[in-house]
Image (cartoon, helix red, strand yellow):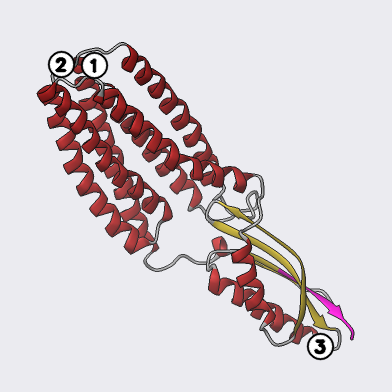
């Protein structure tokens, strides 16, 4: 007796609050893009006048913010589309494609800034208009703080991982702006020219370190990497406790974006009726979905005789 029962959350009717949540997520996305564009314009002007590499690092990070925010808006709209006949598993893989593209852009940009900073350490260049840069950085800190507070509210209300991840990135931006202020103040009040490239290198390295896990995760997801052992062990323990399940084999797992894809075979006594086997497989699916409510779960029942 064999049973195959796919669970496709994307085909279910939408939650009554889904439209309201979608509006909140879009509003958070638009706010992110608007703020990043404003800061890009301000920092571009200050960098052009001052020549500060710390400002350039912050400017590059803001350009990345614009790119990420726009890509997140596109990815969010696409990822929320329900599964269809051409995309049976839904559209959440777009998150991995976007994430990997973002990582390549970030790493290339930050490496360029590090090279420029090393050159500036060898051949120092005096800065100008430092106070203007300080004012812009203070403005950036204030607006970023307001955005982070709003994104936190939206993430709590909607549970959106994209908004939550974007919020973490902007939290880091507050620290970056503080570093820029330190570098510019050092130049303005103490004529310390080497502090600017050092701060730029520190910001670039910080961005690279925070980016690598994102790139690794996106790459693993696109390559069909198995879910972590701790997660699969927890899932197997849940299924093994179901009455009627004699064993589990041919477990296959992966992530597609933030959506787990889980396939497994369970062993059921061959003397069970078809209806009874169906109930057991449904119970196995339900047990897995208690751990990952939006997972794509496929359970196959194999008859065994002892």
Of the numbered discs 3 and 1, the one sitting upstream in the chain is 1
Does residue 155 lie above or below 137 as drawn?
below
The image quadrant that residue 265 belongs to is bottom right
Q: Which residue bears the numbered disc 2?
A: 128
Q: Which residue bears the numbered disc 1?
A: 51
The magenta segment is 299-306
Does residue 204 lie above or below 302 as drawn?
above
Other residues around mark 2 within 10 Å, as few (<14) / some (14–19) / many (≥20)? some
Of the numbered discs 2 and 1, the one sitting upstream in the chain is 1
Q: Is residue 159 magenta?
A: no
Give the distance between the C-alpha atoms of the residues marked 2 and 1, in whole angstroms.
7 Å
Residue lying at the far right in this picture: please name it.
305
Q: Are marks 2 and 1 in contact (CB under 8 Å)?
A: yes
Task: Give the residue at x 60% y 48%.
Answer: 221
Task: Give the residue at x 56% y 50%.
Answer: 91
Q: Which residue bears the numbered disc 3?
A: 272
Task: Give the residue at x 34% y 53%.
Answer: 25
Give the camera-side residue of 129 and 166: 129
Residue 19 falls left or right of residue 125: right
Residue 232 falls left or right of residue 182: right
Q: Secondary structure at mark 2?
A: loop
> In front of the other: label 3 or label 2?
2
Q: Secondary structure at mark 3?
A: loop
Of the numbered discs 3 and 2, the one sitting upstream in the chain is 2
């Amino acid at each position: 007796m064999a049973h195959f029962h796919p669970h496709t959350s994307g085909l279910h009717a939408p939650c009554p609050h889904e439209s309201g949540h979608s509006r909140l997520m879009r509003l958070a996305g638009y706010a992110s893009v608007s703020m990043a564009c404003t800061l890009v314009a301000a920092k571009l002007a200050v960098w052009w006048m001052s020549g500060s590499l710390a400002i350039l690092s912050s400017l590059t990070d803001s350009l990345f913010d614009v790119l990420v925010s726009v890509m997140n808006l596109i990815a969010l709209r696409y990822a929320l589309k329900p599964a269809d006949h051409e995309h049976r598993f839904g559209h959440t893989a777009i998150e991995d494609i976007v994430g990997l593209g973002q990582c390549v852009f970030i790493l290339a940009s930050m490496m360029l800034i590090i090279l420029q900073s090393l050159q500036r350490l060898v051949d120092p260049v005096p800065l100008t208009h430092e106070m203007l840069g300080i004012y812009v950085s203070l403005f950036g800190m204030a607006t970023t703080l307001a955005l982070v507070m709003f994104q936190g509210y939206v993430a709590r209300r909607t549970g959106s991982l994209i908004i939550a991840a974007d919020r973490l990135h902007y939290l880091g931006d507050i620290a970056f702006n503080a570093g820029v202020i330190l570098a510019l103040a050092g130049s303005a009040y103490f004529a310390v020219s080497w502090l600017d490239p050092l701060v730029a290198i520190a910001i670039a390295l910080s961005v690279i370190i925070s980016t690598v896990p994102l790139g690794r995760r996106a790459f693993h997801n696109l390559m069909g990497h198995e879910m972590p052992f701790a997660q699969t062990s927890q899932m197997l323990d849940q299924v093994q406790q179901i009455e009627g399940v004699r064993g589990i084999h041919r477990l296959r797992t992966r992530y597609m974006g933030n959506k787990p894809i889980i396939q497994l075979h369970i062993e059921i006594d061959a003397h069970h009726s078809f209806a009874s086997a169906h109930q057991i497989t449904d119970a196995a699916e339900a047990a897995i979905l208690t751990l990952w409510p939006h997972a794509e779960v496929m359970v196959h029942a194999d008859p065994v005789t002892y």
